[in-house]
Image: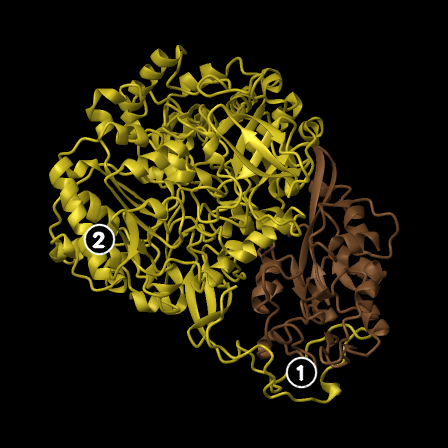
């Protein structure tokens, strides 16, 4: 545990004072009663602390944080009342989830990297910033001169500044960039949302106004994009809304649901088509919305004509009458009915088609951007600091074609038409010499898929620049390691999608000034990118001394200064209405919400190539693709489904090392006393018993492509034949205990979106002995 | 008086973590506030109920009654049960008496537990002036302040009763849970049949617990104790 700075000791008993007992006797025979009035208090470390704010960056969804800082040490952390992301809305209490509470420990964590390192004579060596920047610039120039800047990959995610795009794309000149949503997080659904016209907003419902919420493959109470989500669902339930959860696993969200549909894995697409069948049969669809604002309804209607609930019941394992009931309930509540869908229907090989089928239901019942339905969120009117300063940025990547569209080697990657690059193909690109360098920012490609090949690829690359806070298989492989200050140590204006929130019709912004000094010699990411740019001779393009100054220029169109927002942590801006499509239409070639994607040329090309490669008939409209059509299914050798999951304690690799979260994660499984703080393989007794596996045993899990060890947790939470483990542990991430589940994976993808296929057939066996 | 609404508890353990951080306690120390996940049934007829518990500051404080050196005090001025660690001899009698498994013991062998954030850290709170209301500058309870689902509340019984549903208030007045804590009945739509599970786990005097804990929250103490109580 970290030494807690120089604050006063806890046992200090200053101002100890006994008072009369008459100040407020309890109402009920000795029950707790707090007194009113202004008695002297014992001032502990909180008594002398000053208040500061943060915007939680543990999962980068920016819940407001209120801190107590005593002599440079954060001694307490909690939420901010009424915060757009961290509360249920106006007049409600703000809180922090376990991740957000953990940022206090992260701020003072002695395990963090606090000095820059560069590779000299094969070894990573501690250097000062000047040397690190000079070394980096030399290597970048070498790479550009020898192989061209287009061989460098920008793989930064979760930066608190958008400067990386300017530095790598506009100035250095590479067209290659890997992000989160499309490439590794929920690619299938991300592509569908974008092509159909609702963007990435399909994850969130206008919860508080909703009468009928379907959490489709989503576990909103454990995995959320800000606490406004679980809080909003709880409010909706208080208001009498119906909650339906569609998930093979029993989750805390399923526990709170009115209906839990324990669906057969990867059969979401069939359920969605059958619901549409019922809705059309019952005449509950929104005819005027379909007529005026959609494209391709005929194809949809045709696709669902024979998809009866009885047909879907066979496939999904959900009773036909229940399918009918849910379809009717959803359609009757519409437009105050919404579907929240994220990774659950975004990470398997058939997920683009499956999510298209689900999203089509929104168009069918006309709930899009209407109160209680699928909200199309609008962010604040940020200005472009480069325009504000009249800086004429070059676009040095403008004439570069991404390698996947340039070289014949990638003709077998159909997603290249819609998506440009894929996570899984990068190791092959490295082998072919088309990628030779990379810049990562907290995003750790080693736990996102094709992990073994990625580790080899990182070894092969000429230049690996990484910005991170912890040592891992990624940072240890790097040529340059820049230690970044965490959000609580930076002046931060949250510009990552400040849209969805508990304020359903208001724009908002959230900001904070550094609560404490950066740990050791770490620096904000803005300063790191600016330092690289200056060494590269691009100083004139980035005149801002600090992130705060840059932030100020993002606010040219807003009545608040950065400092004014930071002082109060968040501000609520002007209202935005519903039904934005009435004014602007949808962001598609047809200007309509698209059931059928026949007008999307890039998509049509992808479809044709997949048809040829896989020997299947594909439609551009909604279509049922049985699991196994594009991905793998369990067989005799690997008879079990495996799928990775998220817990409420961790967000990707960023906070696994923190002790309180690890400990409670173990407690949540009743395994705190075990000498193990890795992830658990959750397995139903039906599968565990014949294999002689009990909770607490170490087991080996094996796929056709890889294997590893972790601790078993035997539970009825998961169905027979379907095993899960939390993502973000083991080899490759900072907390190396446990198993990196993506070591089970190599090249499987959704060929339409590039999303790594995270449903993997496996076998598991007990390691023997006494376990841990 | 604590109040708990299992319908609003999302089982996230923010209460346990914020308690640990407020009182500067190491992660591997036993929790003053535990979250236990009670399970029942077989997939898919399966239910899981998260229950967040700590010292209840009982009106009849069984721990105080058995403490040989009188280290434990049920304070008249604010009802909070504190421990004077200068007097504690580490005999664990309180652990045997407590229906909730609330007392924990550190490397020094001395007892520590929830003090309703009367002070910060083990042993703090004892001998302190009465707890003040938050609006008068009293420290808010970290578990209450950080409960994502607003499932935990604390305060004078009259105030907490105002927040409770009619059904919960009636049960409390009828002596449910020995009038030590106010608990909302389970929602009938989503958790039918889980009421008896909650009752069995929270009402320690009830024989024959219907639920099995998901392993118990801690190695010793925690849910398994109050289930078997």
Image location (x, y in percent) of residue B65: 85, 73
Rendered view: A766 above or below A234? above
Q: Which mark is residue A730?
A: none
Rendered view: A300 above or below A325? above
Circle 1 is placed at which residue position?
B128
Q: Nearer the viewer, residue A158 or A310?
A: A158
- Please name which of the two marks, 1 or 2, marks the residue nearer to the observer: 1
- Residue drawn at x 15%, y 35% is A147
- Residue drawn at x 68%, y 33% is A693
Circle 2 marks a residue in which chain?
A: A
Asked if labels 1 and 2 share a chain, the reply is no
Left or right, A27 with respect to A378, comes to right
Give the number of marks: 2
Image location (x, y in percent) of residue A527: 25, 59
User: Distance from label 1 to label 2 (Cα)?
Assistant: 55 Å
Q: Residue furthest front?
A: A121
Left or right, A308 with respect to A343, comes to right
Q: Nearer the viewer, residue B113 or B140?
A: B113
**10 Å crowding of disc 2: few (<14), some (14-19), many (20+):** some
Do we see residue A590 in this rendering?
no
Question: In the rendered picture, chain B carries what hue?
Answer: brown
Question: In the rendered picture, chain A carries what hue?
Answer: yellow
- Tell me, yes or no, whether the two marked residues, 1 and 2, touch with CB atoms within 8 Å: no
Circle 2 is placed at which residue position?
A384
Give residue A588's quadrant in the image: top left
Circle 1 marks a residue in which chain?
A: B
Q: Quadrant of the C terminus of chain A?
A: top right
Left or right, B189 with respect to A511, comes to right
Secondary structure, mark 1, is loop
Image location (x, y in percent) of residue A389: 15, 58
């Amino acid at each position: 545990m970290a030494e807690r700075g120089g604050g006063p000791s806890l046992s200090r008993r200053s101002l100890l004072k006994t008072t009369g007992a008459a100040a407020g006797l309890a109402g009920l025979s000795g029950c707790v009663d707090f007194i009113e009035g202004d008695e002297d208090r014992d001032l502990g470390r909180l008594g002398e602390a000053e208040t500061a704010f943060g915007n939680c960056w543990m999962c980068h969804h920016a819940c407001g944080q209120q801190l107590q800082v005593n002599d440079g040490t954060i001694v307490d952390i909690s939420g901010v009342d009424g915060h757009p992301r961290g509360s249920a809305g106006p007049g409600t209490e703000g809180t922090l989830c376990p991740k957000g509470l953990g940022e206090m420990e992260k701020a003072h964590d002695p395990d963090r990297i606090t000095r820059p390192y560069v590779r000299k004579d094969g070894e990573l060596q501690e250097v000062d910033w000047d040397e690190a920047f000079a070394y980096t610039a030399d290597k970048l120039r070498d790479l550009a001169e020898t192989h061209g800047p287009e061989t460098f990959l920008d793989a930064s995610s979760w930066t608190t500044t958008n400067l990386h795009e300017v530095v790598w794309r506009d100035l250095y000149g590479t067209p290659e960039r890997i992000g989160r949503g499309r490439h590794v997080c929920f690619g299938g659904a991300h592509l569908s949302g974008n092509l159909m016209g609702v963007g990435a907003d399909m994850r969130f419902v206008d919860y508080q106004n909703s009468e009928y919420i379907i959490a489709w493959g989503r576990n909103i109470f454990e995995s959320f994009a800000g606490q406004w989500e679980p809080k909003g669902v709880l409010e909706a339930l208080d208001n009498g809304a119906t909650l339906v959860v569609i998930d093979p696993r029993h989750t805390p969200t399923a526990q709170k649901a009115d209906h839990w549909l324990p669906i057969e894995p990867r059969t979401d697409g069939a359920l969605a088509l059958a619901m549409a069948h019922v809705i059309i049969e019952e005449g509950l669809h929104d005819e005027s919305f379909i007529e005026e604002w959609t494209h391709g309804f005929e194809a949809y209607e045709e696709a669902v004509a024979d998809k009866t609930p009885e047909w879907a019941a066979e496939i999904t394992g959900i009773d036909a009458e229940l399918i009918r009931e849910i379809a009717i309930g959803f359609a009757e509540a519409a437009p105050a009915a919404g579907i929240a869908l994220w990774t659950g229907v975004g990470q398997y090989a058939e997920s683009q088609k499956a999510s298209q089928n689900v999203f089509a239901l929104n168009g069918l019942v006309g709930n899009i951007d209407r109160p209680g339905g699928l909200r199309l969120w609008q962010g604040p009117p940020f200005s472009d600091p480069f325009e504000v300063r009249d800086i004429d940025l070059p676009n040095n990547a403008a004439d570069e074609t991404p390698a996947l569209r340039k070289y014949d080697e990638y003709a077998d990657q159909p997603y290249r038409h819609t998506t440009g690059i894929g996570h899984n193909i990068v190791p092959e690109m490295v082998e072919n010499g088309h990628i030779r360098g990379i810049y990562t920012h907290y995003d750790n490609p080693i736990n996102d898929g094709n992990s073994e090949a990625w580790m080899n690829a990182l070894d092969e690359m000429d230049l690996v620049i990484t910005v991170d806070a912890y040592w891992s298989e990624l940072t240890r492989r790097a040529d340059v390691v820049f230690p970044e200050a965490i959000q609580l140590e930076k002046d931060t204006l949250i510009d990552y999608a400040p849209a969805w929130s508990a304020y359903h019709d208001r724009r908002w912004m959230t900001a904070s000034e550094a609560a404490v000094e950066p740990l050791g010699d770490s620096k904000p990411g803005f300063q790191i990118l600016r330092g690289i740019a200056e060494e590269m001779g691009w100083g004139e393009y980035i005149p801002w001394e600090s992130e705060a100054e840059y932030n100020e220029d993002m606010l040219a169109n807003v009545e608040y200064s950065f400092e004014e927002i930071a002082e109060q942590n968040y501000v609520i801006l002007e209202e935005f209405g519903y039904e934005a499509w009435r004014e602007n239409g949808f962001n598609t070639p047809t200007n309509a919400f698209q059931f059928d994607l026949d007008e999307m040329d890039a998509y049509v090309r992808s479809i044709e190539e997949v048809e040829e490669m896989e020997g299947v008939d594909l439609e551009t409209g909604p279509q049922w693709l049985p699991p196994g059509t594009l991905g793998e299914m369990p067989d005799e050798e690997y008879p079990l489904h495996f799928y990775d999951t998220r817990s409420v304690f961790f967000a990707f690799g960023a906070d696994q090392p923190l002790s309180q979260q690890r400990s409670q994660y173990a407690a949540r499984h009743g395994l705190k006393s075990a000498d193990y703080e890795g992830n658990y393989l959750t397995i139903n007794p039906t599968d565990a018993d014949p294999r002689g596996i009990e909770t607490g045993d170490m087991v080996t899990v094996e796929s056709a492509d890889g294997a590893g060890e972790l601790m078993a947790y035997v539970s009825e939470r998961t169905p027979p034949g379907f095993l899960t483990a939390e993502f973000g542990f083991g080899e490759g991430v900072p907390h190396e205990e446990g198993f990196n589940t993506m070591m089970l994976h190599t090249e499987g993808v959704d060929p339409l979106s590039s999303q790594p296929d995270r449903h993997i057939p496996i076998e598991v066996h007990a390691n023997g002995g006494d376990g841990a | 008086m604590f109040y708990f609404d299992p319908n609003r508890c999302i089982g996230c353990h923010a209460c346990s973590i914020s308690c640990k951080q407020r009182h500067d306690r190491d992660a591997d120390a036993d929790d003053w506030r535990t979250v236990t996940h009670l399970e029942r049934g077989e997939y898919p007829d399966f239910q899981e109920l998260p229950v967040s518990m700590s010292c209840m500051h009982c009106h009849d404080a069984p721990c105080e009654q058995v403490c040989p050196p009188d280290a434990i005090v049920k304070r008249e001025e604010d009802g909070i049960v504190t421990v004077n660690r200068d007097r504690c001899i580490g005999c664990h009698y309180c652990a045997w008496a407590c229906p909730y498994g609330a007392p924990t013991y550190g490397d020094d062998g001395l007892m520590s537990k929830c003090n309703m954030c009367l002070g910060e850290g083990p042993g703090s709170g004892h001998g302190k002036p009465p707890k003040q209301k938050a609006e008068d500058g009293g420290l808010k309870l970290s578990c209450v302040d950080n409960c994502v689902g607003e499932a935990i509340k604390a305060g004078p019984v009259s105030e907490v009763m105002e927040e409770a549903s009619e059904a919960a208030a009636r049960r409390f007045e009828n002596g449910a849970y020995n009038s030590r804590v106010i608990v909302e009945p389970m929602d009938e739509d989503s958790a039918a049949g889980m009421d008896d599970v909650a009752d069995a786990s929270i009402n320690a005097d009830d024989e024959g617990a219907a639920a099995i804990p998901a392993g118990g929250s801690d190695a010793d103490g925690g849910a398994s104790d109050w289930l078997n109580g």
